[in-house]
Image (cartoon, grey):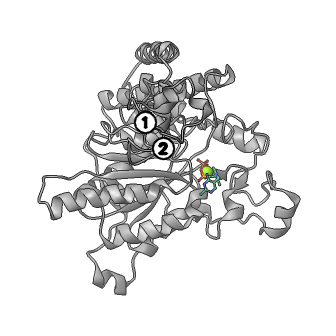
């Protein structure tokens, strides 16, 4: 069976022109695939070490830990993780149905297959910690506590959505939950996350507030070839910011293979180059992700600075719901489908007698009902008023587009005749 990193992987998804310009797929070191077990640790050289406090590789700490309980989680924790992953999967499956029924507009990017990353990190966070996502953001918002109703309504473009229907699929935001977006441009969220982490540090060190909030920034493998990634790694390391950069390496950027587009495909190595630990973890295993996340999050909370975590994962659907997903190799898809993170957690819970089939079925039923209810709620919710069209567009709310009665001109039946003369 071909693997994602096989040298013989067919070069799908590129034009003939690209085939001529791009280097052939290379074979990465065998340690790259799969798990935290055999990962190399890149240490800082002495010159760096002398300038900074020592940087400890996260996986070293994870390895050194000798848990008194051989199980990685308690029953309660296991059920929380299972429920969150089921919520992510069911919600996205429902989105696909609703999209094809014409209930949603624009591009919709689903997260199926990557649930272990969102759940593994976000379920360790507190409400005041921040999360920054990409356009593949529904599940990050759900894990962070934004309700299924608010996310579904946002997708339906309704006024009850978390951005009152103005954001849509790619812009999930909730101030209350410190879910800081949802960004359509790749890499756009990374500086926002770096700023949020700077805020925490400023509150603690300058304003002397009791603040140990951390920020987790999620983004894809393709995004790591974008300049903002490097600029932010530099600033975060320089200022020792409480941030975790989480790369969801699903091996593809739309139809471009990570191995064909990236000079060194091991993204985690870029952490030590900037003076922070870099970790590679199996992103299809929520328990491994969670162990790495625990250390990275507590390291940030202790004020010891940023960590770069590369989670190797896979998306089970096309890039977006408009993508027929014909570019990726069937054998590669089958390989990762067999490593479904939800099935793996279910097996762990049952084999370790942390849950039985009945308990897990009850959770699945509860989530099915919740997602159904979210759809009914979104469907029955009102559209935003037309006046919302110009909100947040102009700095002066009394400026362009406001009629003599103080209302936005677009509420006026004659709006289409022109709004410039107020
Ligand atoms: C600045 C910018 N350039 C290009 C695009 C077009 N684009 C949309 S998704 C994407 C690929 C991103 O891949 P990756 O970061 O691996 O995320 P994934 O979709 O795999 O989650 C690109 C290039 C964009 N949205 N923003
Ligand atoms: Mg990708």
Q: Name the residue: 51% across, 25% down.
A: 412
The secondary structure type at the circle numbered 2 is loop
Q: Position of residue 116 (x, y in %)?
A: 48, 39
Q: Position of residue 236 (x, y in %)?
A: 36, 66
Q: Position of residue 3 (x, y in %)?
A: 71, 50
The secondary structure type at the circle numbered 1 is helix
Q: Is residue 63 above or below residue 70?
A: below
Q: Is residue 79 visible?
A: yes
Q: Is residue 242 visible?
A: no
Q: Nearer the viewer, residue 334 or 146?
A: 146
**Residue with the mark numbered 1:** 141
- Quarter of the image for residue 84 reads top left
Q: Name the residue: 43% across, 36% down.
A: 141
Q: Are marks 2 and 1 in contact (CB under 8 Å)?
A: yes
* Left or right: 94, with 81 as reference point: right
Q: Position of residue 155 (x, y in %)?
A: 53, 29
**Residue with the mark numbered 2:** 182
* Left or right: 343, with 397 as reference point: right
Q: Name the residue: 49% across, 69% down.
A: 230
Q: Is residue 69 above or below residue 58?
A: above
Gap in angstroms between the C-alphas marked 2 and 1 = 9 Å
Q: Nearer the viewer, residue 3 or 38?
A: 3
Q: Nearer the viewer, residue 395 or 33?
A: 395
Q: Nearer the viewer, residue 386 or 421?
A: 421
């Amino acid at each position: 069976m071909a693997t994602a990193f096989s040298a013989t992987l067919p070069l799908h998804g590129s034009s003939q022109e690209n085939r001529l310009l791009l280097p052939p797929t290379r074979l990465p070191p065998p340690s790259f695939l799969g798990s935290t077990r055999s990962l190399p640790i890149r240490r800082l050289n002495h010159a760096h070490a002398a300038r900074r406090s020592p940087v400890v590789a996260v996986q070293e700490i994870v390895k050194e830990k000798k848990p008194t309980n051989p199980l990685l989680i308690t029953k309660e924790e296991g059920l929380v993780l299972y429920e969150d992953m089921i919520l992510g999967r069911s919600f996205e499956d429902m989105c696909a149905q609703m999209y094809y029924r014409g209930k949603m507009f624009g591009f919709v990017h689903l997260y199926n297959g990557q649930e272990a990353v969102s759940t593994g990190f976000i379920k360790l966070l507190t409400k005041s910690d921040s999360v920054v996502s990409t356009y593949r953001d529904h599940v990050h918002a759900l894990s962070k506590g934004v309700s299924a109703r608010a996310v579904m309504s946002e997708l339906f473009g309704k006024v009850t959505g978390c951005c009152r229907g103005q954001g849509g699929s790619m812009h999930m935001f909730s101030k209350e939950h410190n879910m800081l977006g949802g960004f359509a441009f790749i890499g756009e969220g990374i500086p926002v996350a770096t700023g949020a982490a700077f805020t925490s540090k400023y509150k603690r060190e300058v304003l002397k507030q009791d603040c140990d909030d951390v920020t987790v920034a999620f983004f894809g493998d393709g995004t790591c070839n974008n300049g903002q990634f490097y600029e932010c790694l530099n600033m975060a390391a320089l200022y020792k910011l409480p941030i975790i950069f989480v790369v969801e390496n699903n091996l593809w950027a739309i139809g471009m293979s990570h191995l064909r587009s990236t000079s060194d495909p091991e993204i985690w190595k870029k952490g030590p180059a900037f003076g922070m630990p870099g970790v590679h973890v199996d992103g299809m295993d929520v328990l491994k992700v969670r162990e790495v996340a625990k250390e990275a999050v507590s390291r940030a909370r202790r004020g010891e600075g940023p960590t770069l975590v590369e989670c190797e994962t896979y998306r089970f659907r096309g890039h977006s719901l408009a993508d027929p997903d014909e570019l990726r190799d069937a054998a590669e898809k089958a390989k990762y489908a067999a490593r479904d993170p939800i099935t793996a957690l279910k097996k762990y819970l049952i084999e370790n007698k942390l849950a039985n089939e009945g308990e897990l079925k009850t959770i699945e039923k509860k989530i099915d009902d919740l997602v159904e209810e979210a759809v009914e709620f979104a469907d029955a919710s009102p559209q935003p008023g037309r006046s919302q069209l110009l909100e947040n567009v102009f700095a002066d709310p009394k400026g362009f587009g406001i009629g003599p009665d103080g209302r936005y001109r677009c509420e006026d039946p004659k709006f289409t005749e022109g709004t410039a003369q107020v």
